[in-house]
Image (tube, rainbow, N blue to C red):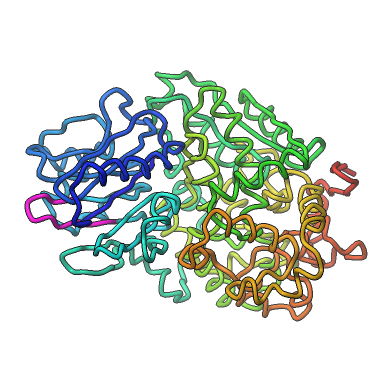
Amino acid sequence: MCGILAVLGCSDDSQAKRVRVLELSRRLKHRGPDWSGLYQHGDCYLAHQRLAIIDPASGDQPLFNEDKSVVVTVNGEIYNHEELRKKLANHKFRTGSDCDVIAHLYEEYGEDFVDMLDGIFSFVLLDTRDNSFIVARDAIGVTSLYFGWGLDGSVWISSELKGLNDDCEHFETFPPGHLYSSKLGGFRRWYNPPWFSEAIPSVPYDPLVLRRAFENAVIKRLMTDVPFGVLLSGGLDSSLVASITARYLAGTKAAKHWGTQLHSFCIGLEGSPDLKAAREVADYLGTVHHEFHFTVQDGIDAIEDVIYHIETYDVTTIRASTPMFLMSRKIKSLGVKMVISGEGSDEIFGGYLYFHKAPNKEEFHRETCRKIKALHQYDCLRANKATSAWGLEARVPFLDKEFISVAMAIDPESKLINKDQGRIEKWVLRRAFDDEERPYLPKHILYRQKEQFSDGVGYSWIDGLKAHAAQHVTDKMMLNASYIFPHNTPTTKEAYYYRMIFERFFPQNSARLTVPGGASVACSTAKAVEWDAAWKNNLDPSGRAALGVHLSAYDAETTLSNVPSKVIDSIPRMMELPGVAIQS
């Protein structure tokens, strides 16, 4: 992932202003350590910090059209750039960069070209002929982007809060799937899929259609000119990504550059559920597997850096970002610059354990829609910034536009968890890859129960965080929490601890408003908390808060009545000792 910063219409074209923009752009250098660029046209500045993945030799930014009248700074990957170049046969391209098509598409189609892009992106395009500009963000918000306004009438755009928070009077998250046009003076949604209205779909479930759609999503993300690998937790989603990558890598351009031996990466506490499962999947697929260990203290020591880079005080996001942040540093040290990851599946298929309590297919579907719409505030934020902190790019095939269209058109009756029919969470995805002739994964991995990343790295990780926060936040501090933090008031000592750190880095009111809030159990939305009256007294985002569902739930007396007996037989049951997950 690259880092972009744009300051437009600031009424200041002085050298001092240029120096300030450069200074702010350097705050994003971790995102793009390979090269820096700054273009100035009057009082408009477009800055770029590059992470070179495609055409490392000549793809430096900003990018231009033929006569340099259109200028673009981009963070992203355009997977269909070769097809788009064919549509632009009368244009001359300066580089081999996948993002080079954007300026030329604008010349050809005006502001209505964004939906033609298949990929992840945030970009600012300046038309110097009339000083108009457009800003756009990808459909789901895989890339991070913020929008701000200065007292001098300037407009600011940055990949991260830290690029603009000190210089803007007000700023906010740039909405995913939207375009801002200076000519129209506002935002408009360019991404308008059928599922966005939350209408209940009725397409019959076809496992082969779903399988092929996901295989295509993974294959297109093998576009790279640099070494890459896969993140492998041993859970369903990352294991499927690894399996498909291993299966189709040999026929790609990437294999010609870097060979057909796939590298996989996993992190966890000693003895954690993820480490064991990932090792088994790696052995099955024949990957070169890299297993990283961390201690609870290692994670606690990194919390301040994590909050600075992830730019949130959301408890779930920080819990899961910390091991990913530590792992990304290790991966980058091995010379790898891009990884493929499994984010998004749980939102699309209702994979979180609280979906066991969905009252009907209609509410199940609406909750998946709500979860996808909020991804840019949670898992996308984590995946993007935890990796970008170390100049590593994460690609997420489950959030492919075409795949989402296929998956969200399925009649949600097929997605419902049904113990009488032996269906656990994400059954439609598991069934699609349950191939007896050419197995993608071992059966018990294919049907392994959902583990949230912050749980799967080792259950004592969350318990350790809670204990650490309790040492730094007193009961007296909690009594005054609503006065100190009236917006999104922290309700636990852990949340209060994270909030104190966040406010130190980002003290502006606009910054605290970029972070979502509300009640949640096992990563649910506030609306889904209503599904079970008992949840209101157990508001914790860990999957283990799904009492009666998770096999290692917090409640020691929990029965397994909500899990089909057929499924229990095929899932390794995890019993917890401090810092160790033991298979029984």
In this view, 330 is above or below 154:
above
Q: Nearer the viewer, residue 127 or 444?
A: 127
Residue 130 drawn in magenta? yes
Q: How many marks?
A: 0
On the picture, is 566 further left or further right than 160? right
In this view, 223 is above or below 7:
above
In this view, 527 is above or below 395:
below
Q: Nearer the viewer, residue 323 or 152?
A: 152
Please report the residue visible at 66 percent of the width from the left and 42 percent of the height from the top. Answer: 302
Quarter residue 79 falls in? top left
Please report the residue visible at 55 percent of the width from the left and 58 percent of the height from the top. Answer: 378
In the picture, which quadrant includes the N terminus?
A: top left
Quarter residue 404 falls in? bottom left
Tell me which segment is drawn in magenta.
126-135
In this view, 137 is above or below 24:
below
Residue 258 screen position, x and y as percent:
45, 19
Residue 433 screen position, x and y as percent:
58, 46
Residue 353 drawn in magenta? no
On the picture, is 558 further left or further right than 567? right
Q: Nearer the viewer, residue 516 or 477?
A: 477
Quarter residue 544 falls in? bottom right
Q: Is residue 90 visible?
A: no
In the picture, which quadrant includes the C terminus?
A: top right
